[in-house]
Amino acid sequence: MCWLARAVPNLIWTLRWEADLSTADHDSLSGLLLRVYPMHDKTFRDGRSWSGAIPEARVIGYDGARPVAHLGFLRRQLRIDDGAASVLVGDAGLVGVDPDFRGSGVGLQLLTECATALQGLALPFGFLTCGPDVVPFYENGGWQLLPGQVTRMIDNDLHPETYTGPALALPVTAGIEQWPTGHTVVRDGLEV
Ligand SMILES: CC(C)(COP(=O)(O)OP(=O)(O)OC[C@H]1O[C@@H](n2cnc3c(N)ncnc32)[C@H](O)[C@@H]1OP(=O)(O)O)[C@@H](O)C(=O)NCCC(=O)NCCS
């Protein structure tokens, strides 16, 4: 009965705003993010549930009281080529599923819930940067690679950085053809 093992777990999905999170919420999210990113054990400790920029809101999937899937985002205007154009996005990060819940469609469900949240806020696009290995995951969720663009931003040590790895956009209320052309996307802040 292998198909049962791949059934998507029945989670409770919520959009949580940052000002509504309690200390206990941050503790449990910090624990989840530590399980998702064990190599960042110096970041996700003492109730710290963010890495770079603190999210404005989070899409969280709960198994009972336990958070097992998480994505954070904040609304941001990206500048293209130092201001030749700008684009409003839900800038996303801290994407992860508890290892106990992986491989059963929870990650894709997380991306669907994210799209619903961004739609509810009438945002034209989602945006994120990631490592090359997870691009297929995001593409499965409707995100589109932005080839030929680099992302200028501030790294977690607060130094300017030009990230040449993958950047992806999710068309939400706009079509991908409305994504601005230009070589450099400027994120005037830290990655979520
Ligand atoms: C990436 C992650 C969120 C996927 O969660 P998940 O619940 O296992 O994903 P799903 O079961 O919904 O898989 C959805 C699809 O994406 C693919 N996929 C899953 N993880 C992937 C990965 N790490 N790289 C590439 N593709 C991946 C799956 O094969 C599946 O495709 P299929 O339906 O064609 O088989 C999870 O592996 C995770 O938390 N990883 C560690 C944190 C991380 O890398 N986050 C992204 C940082 S930018």
Image (cartoon, rainbow, N blue to C red):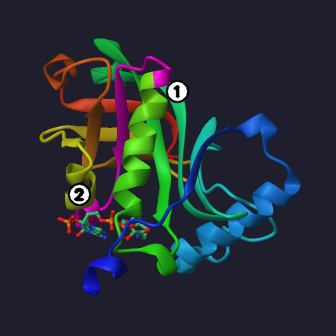
Q: Tell me the kind of residue under disc 2.
A: Val
Q: x, y percentage for residue 162? A: 34, 45
> Dot 1 lies on which element?
strand
Question: Left of 45 or right of it: where is 10?
Answer: left
* Residue located beneath label 1 in the image: 75
On whether residue 168 falls in the magenta region, the answer is no
The number of discs equals: 2
Q: Which tag, 1 or 2, sits closer to the chain's start?
A: 1
- Say which residue appears at 38% left-offset and 48% top-offset: 111
Name the one closer to the observer, 130 or 110.
Answer: 110
- Say which residue appears at 25% left-offset and 42% top-offset: 143
> Dot 2 lies on which element?
helix
Q: x, y percentage for residue 173? A: 32, 18
Residue at mark 1 to residue at mark 2: CA–CA distance: 22 Å
Numbered tag placed on residue 110 in the rendering: none
Q: Is residue 154 visible?
A: no
Instruction: Count neighbours of disc 2 (C-alpha within 10 A) and say few if under 14, some if 14 to 19, many if 20 or more.
Output: some
Question: Left of 151 or right of it: where is 65?
Answer: right
Span shown in magenta: 120-134
Asked whether mark 2 and ligand 1 are closer than 8 Å, the reply comes as yes
- Give the vertical position of 105 relative to 37 (above or below): above
Instruction: Count neighbours of disc 1 (C-alpha within 10 A) and say few if under 14, some if 14 to 19, many if 20 or more.
Output: some
- Say which residue appears at 36% left-offset and 70% top-offset: 7
